[in-house]
Image: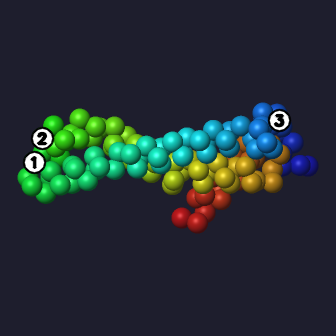
Amino acid sequence: ADADADDSVLPPSPSWGGVAAPALLLTAASYFVGIYGLLLLPVDLSSAYGSAEGDADDGPSTPYGTYLPLWRAVYWTAFVFCWGVLPLSRRFLLSGHVGFLARLGDAFAGCVAPI
């Protein structure tokens, strides 16, 4: 019996230029987070400089202090993308299985096994 027989077969996803829409969305989101992180990099440098002088890490005493929560959200979003979402989605898309659950299981096994 086929291991994928009990899984539902994935419907074809909309594509643009032969690339699946979920892959395009993840790529666009990762580029957005990366570029936004570069734009907010002075906030990180300012907070490091302020904490070295003894100021509060997230206080408004630094010029960029009000953007610090936004910087932290972008930083941790990029971290989760790089170490979780993107490797998992890559393994999912490259899996040879047909069913959704089989692909998801293969992706998790491939991402967790090296650890």
Quarter of the C terminus within the rendering: bottom right
Alpha carbon separation for disc pair 1 and 3: 55 Å
Q: Nearer the viewer, residue 81 or 70?
A: 70
Residue 70 picture quarter: top left
Q: Which badge, 1 or 3, is on the more N-terminal residue?
A: 3
Q: Is 51 on the left-hand or right-hand side of 81?
A: left
Secondary structure of the residue carrying numbered label 3: loop
Give me the residue at 12% from left, 40% from top: 61
Residues marked 1 and 3 touching at CB (< 8 Å): no
Q: CA distance from mark 3 to mark 2?
A: 53 Å
Residue underneath mark 1 = 55
Residue highlighted by disc 3: 12
Which residue type carries mark 3? Pro
Residue under label 2: 61
Dot 1: what SS? loop
Asked if residue 108 is positioned above or below residue 9 in the image, the reply reads: below
Pointer 3 and pointer 2: residues touching (CB < 8 Å)? no
Q: Label 1 sits on what residue type?
A: Asp
Whether residues under marks 1 and 2 lie with C-beta atoms below 8 angstroms apart, the answer is: yes
